[in-house]
Image (tube, helix red, strand yellow):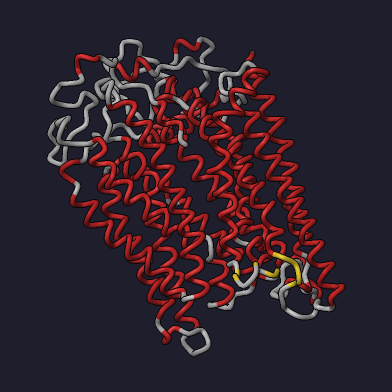
Amino acid sequence: MDAIDEEKPLLPLQSQDVGSEYTRDGSVDINKQPALKHSTGNWKACFLILGVEFCENMTYFVISRNLVTFLTTVLHESKVDAARNVSAWVGACFLTPVVGAFLADTYWGRYWTIVVFLPVYITGMLIVTVSASLPMFSTSSEHGNVHRSVVYLGLYLAALGSGAMKPCTSSFGADQFDSTDLEELPKKASFFSWSFYMTTVSTLLSSTVLVWLQDNVGWGVGCAIPTAFMIISFPIFIAGSRVYRFRKLGFSPLKSLCQVIVAAVRKCHLQLPENKSLLYDPSNSSSTTEASHKIQPTNQFRFLDKAAIVLPPSDETCNKPMSSWSLCTVTQVEELKMLLRMFPTWASFVIFFAVNGQMSSTFIEQGMVMDNHVGSFAIPPASLTIIAVLSVLALVPVYEIISVPLVKHFTGHDKGFSHAQRIGIGLSLSMIMMVYAALLEMKRLAIVQSSGLADHNVAAPMSILWQTPAYFLQGVAEIFSCIGMSQFFYDQAPDSMKSVCAALGHLAIASGAYINTFVLGAVAVITTCSGAPGWIPDNLNEGHLDYFFWMMATLSLLNLAMFVYSSTRHRENTAS
């Protein structure tokens, strides 16, 4: 759950305003008129938005959960290439939210960003569905290269549409509630709970029913169903335009960060004044918001303070207002500094999500060479990812209702665990997961050797259910790390940049996916020299996937050590 549901009201809450005709948070309707409280927003608008969010999440996971299987069995890519391409695609899905957030906050607004990119998403899914359905695109024919190009065109159009929508749907849903209304404010928190629930249900549906249809009925059918839901959701979403509430576009925080950097570089030759009060910090601001967000100057990253140096007026500039790209306030500078202080923790999550990426790539490839039969039922390797989802659904209530009060009794911390403790526990569990996966692969290879199957690309006589503990550990790791991440970025963010810092989570996922792609590529090159089959060959029985898992476990251990060091330094700096 995002911590955004703890947002402070824009105006003081007053019970006598509950029955007023218009909202008090500045929202407007589709005609840019003040929004009427009883005919716009609230749950009647959110149901439509939740529908779009459900369809978007279901479509994303129906691709990501089983894409490695599609690439290896349909496009006949090597296992290492498939794993790299899956990581690259996932990275694109979580890198493009920056584009969507920038367009939504600066130019179009959240509604129009969804309206523009939902058809892009649908187009991409239609291309993928058609390319998976028509026999003319069979890779065994001369059209194999055409098929591959068409598939990747559809996949990356879908990535663009999905990524651009991700930062907009839940935020647009939250916009439907007036933060200054005593009755609507609790509903806003309830919306995020239902949003989390709907996305989790869609993840389960994708990882079970739709993945099974892809493996047993056909890839075209498995992709056509979520595509049909997406097509239906588009006109329904448009039909609700008159009941939505819209927020007026304000100052772009991303633009503010760029202004500080540009202004500091322009003045790099200047000497900082000893007296910090000489830096530009207008105390008599006409904006109440600016006054409430005022931040005092600090000693870290002093170079950036040059952006707030006030130049003496010259004959050419005395009659012209100073450009915001040449002069920034102390508050703008300090907001950038606060983001820089978060970087070590953000970097820890990059490695965490690189390890997490194994669930949709190498873990599935490992499951493909294990016995996936339970009685007469064959379990698709990609479906085991639901173990992580189910563990989250089952353990989050336990965590919040039982664990937090119990730990709070011993630590005295209001939230039971501190941010650093939660994140550290999650990183530790992620490392243990990789150790288990490595030990499991060692056992599988030993069985292959003893059975004389090393030279054959066949499944080992070892149940795929042995992967269950690894997926469970990853689910528990996400409970600690992801909750800790959301709360850390929210609490440590400047008041005017809560949404920007929330987007850092998407960037960490994208960066982790690309790190995973790089590592897989490097492993493929280094371990196949001198004609060796490599760690991750097409026939995993001839490789050493366990070496790769041990390497990722070592990387996780180093990441944990760096996080402990940086969090200790951060605590010391805060205390001083």
Q: Where residue 190 appears, x then y in whole percent?
A: 37, 33
Q: In which quarter of the image is the C terminus?
A: top right
Q: Is residue 541 left or right of residue 468?
A: right
Q: Where residue 212 appears, x then y in whole percent?
A: 51, 68
Q: Which of 271 and 133 is in front in this view?
A: 133
Task: Spot the residue most to the right.
Answer: 450
Residue at the spot 53% in from the left edge and 88% down from the top edge: 140
Task: Spot the residue most to the front.
Answer: 375
Q: How many marks?
A: 0
Q: Nearer the viewer, residue 519 or 474?
A: 474
Quadrant of res 76: bottom right
Query: Does residue 528 appear in this view?
Result: no
Residue at the spot 68% in from the left edge and 18% down from the top edge: 410
Residue at the spot 55% in from the left edge and 72% down from the top edge: 71
Q: Is residue 13 left or right of residue 559?
A: left
Q: Where residue 547 appears, x then y in whole percent?
A: 79, 59
* Above or below, 453 relative to 157: below
Q: Where residue 44 appears, x then y in whole percent?
A: 23, 41
Query: Does residue 79 appear in this view?
Result: yes
* Above or below, 376 relative to 191: below
Quadrant of res 302: top right
